[in-house]
Image: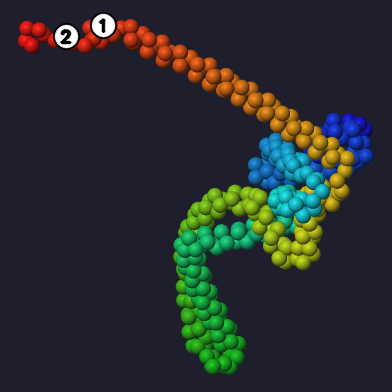
């Protein structure tokens, strides 16, 4: 239990030696440290899942996810440990504003990958719908890229229609021939029973139409087989082009795609939008909880000891500075005194040496020349 408490004290950024002196503060800082720790755990999980959607490798995702969680843990620990209770609420709130803004940003960043995991099934269904739409668009685009297939299909249908018209004409002649033989009165028959002149004419027309239909069927069948071969060749090319695009469509499962799917789902479903908002608010509450605990809690014994310890450091610094300044001033005074005396002696000695070196005849007055006076 003590080891767990020490670990959470460390997570809260507190001084373990000071907290041991104030056991009444232990619970508060254990709670703060636990919040910071579990925020880092959530960040590691979220980062691992987000990176897995990018790299599709759990080894890489776990490594960088743990690195991301450690960074978030360090930031949260720094935010909490850098706050000081000075007994001035307005000043403390002003100092906490940048930390709160950073905590809000971290909460949003951490919550997004977890939202993707929470709504994974719904997002997968939305991605499948988008993939189907992409496949349809790809096929439509490829169909426009191979107009030869449409032209060959039209020609094939034209040949079939031509054969159908020839068959309908043959069937019509067959009906007229039968009606003529059995004496049925119509607009194109005489109404006489038996194989008369009209019946023989109808039979000749029927034979000619049958031969024409047979020849047309043989000719069109050969042409249709050729068209089918060409159509299959173009379809094979189109399928090859589609298979080139298929991997990109099947791989439409990245982080950005899932974010886009989640955005569309929240637009379509009010329930999902509400759930997303509450999830973000939950992580904002978790991320900002240590800061608010520090702000709303009263100044405790630990804060007093911490301030005393920091003041001692300041006093120690002042003492060392005063001692160092005194030593420096003393050395300067000693240097100035000894250096000044040495300089005066040097000048005096230099003057004395200079007078000794002056010649005596240069120092006496010139004598008068008696012969010239």
Above/below status of 231 relative to 244? below
Residue neighbourhood size for the residue with mark 1, other residues' Cα within 10 Å, grouped as few (<14), some (14–19), many (≥20): few
Task: Report whether residue 236 is seen.
Answer: no
The residue nearer to you, when weighing 201 against 169, is: 169
Q: Nearer the viewer, residue 34 or 207?
A: 34
Residue shown at 77% from the left, 36% from the top: 311
Q: Position of residue 215 (x, y in %)?
A: 46, 68
Q: How many marks?
A: 2
Q: Which mark is residue 360?
A: 1
Can the viewer see residue 172 in this picture?
A: yes
Marks 1 and 2, how far apart at CA: 14 Å
Residue 263 placement, left or right of 249: right
Instruction: State the image coordinates of residue 95 (x, y, percent, origin top left).
Output: 73, 50
Quadrant where the N terminus is found in the figure: top right
Q: Is residue 183 above or below residue 333?
A: below
Q: Position of residue 315 (x, y in %)?
A: 74, 32
């Amino acid at each position: 239990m003590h080891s767990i408490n020490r670990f959470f004290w460390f997570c809260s950024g507190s001084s373990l030696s000071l907290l041991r002196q104030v056991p009444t503060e232990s619970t508060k800082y254990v709670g703060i440290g636990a919040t910071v720790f579990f925020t880092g755990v959530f960040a590691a999980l979220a980062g691992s899942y987000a990176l897995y959607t990018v790299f599709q490798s759990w080894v890489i995702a776990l490594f960088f996810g743990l690195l991301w969680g450690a960074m978030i843990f360090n930031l949260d620990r720094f935010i909490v440990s850098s706050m000081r209770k000075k007994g001035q609420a307005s000043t403390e709130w002003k100092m906490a504003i940048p930390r709160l803004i950073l905590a809000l940003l971290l909460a949003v960043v951490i919550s997004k990958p977890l939202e993707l995991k929470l709504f994974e099934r719904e997002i997968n269904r939305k991605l499948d719908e988008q993939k189907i739409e992409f496949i349809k668009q790809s096929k439509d685009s490829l169909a426009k890229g191979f107009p030869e297939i449409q032209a060959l299909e039209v020609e094939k249908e034209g040949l079939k229609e031509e054969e159908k018209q020839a068959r309908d004409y043959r069937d019509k002649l067959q009906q007229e021939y039968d009606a003529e033989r059995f004496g049925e009165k119509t607009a194109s028959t005489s109404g006489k029973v038996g194989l008369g002149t009209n019946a023989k004419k109808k039979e000749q027309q029927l034979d000619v139409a049958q031969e024409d239909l047979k020849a047309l069927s043989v000719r069109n069948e050969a042409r249709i087989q050729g068209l089918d071969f060409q159509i299959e060749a173009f379809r094979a090319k189109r399928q090859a082009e589609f298979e080139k695009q298929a991997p990109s469509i099947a791989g439409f499962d990245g982080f950005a795609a899932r974010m886009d799917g989640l955005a569309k789902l929240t637009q379509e479903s009010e329930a999902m939008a509400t759930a997303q908002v509450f999830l973000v608010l939950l992580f904002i509450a978790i991320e900002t909880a240590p800061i608010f605990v520090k702000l709303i809690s009263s100044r405790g014994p630990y804060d007093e000891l911490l301030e005393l310890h920091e003041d001692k450091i300041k006093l120690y610094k002042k003492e060392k500075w005063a001692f160092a300044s005194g030593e420096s001033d003393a050395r300067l005074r000693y240097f100035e005194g000894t250096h000044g005396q040495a300089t005066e002696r040097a000048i005096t000695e230099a003057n004395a040496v200079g007078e000794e070196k002056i010649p005596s005849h240069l120092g006496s007055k010139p004598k008068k020349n008696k012969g010239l006076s």
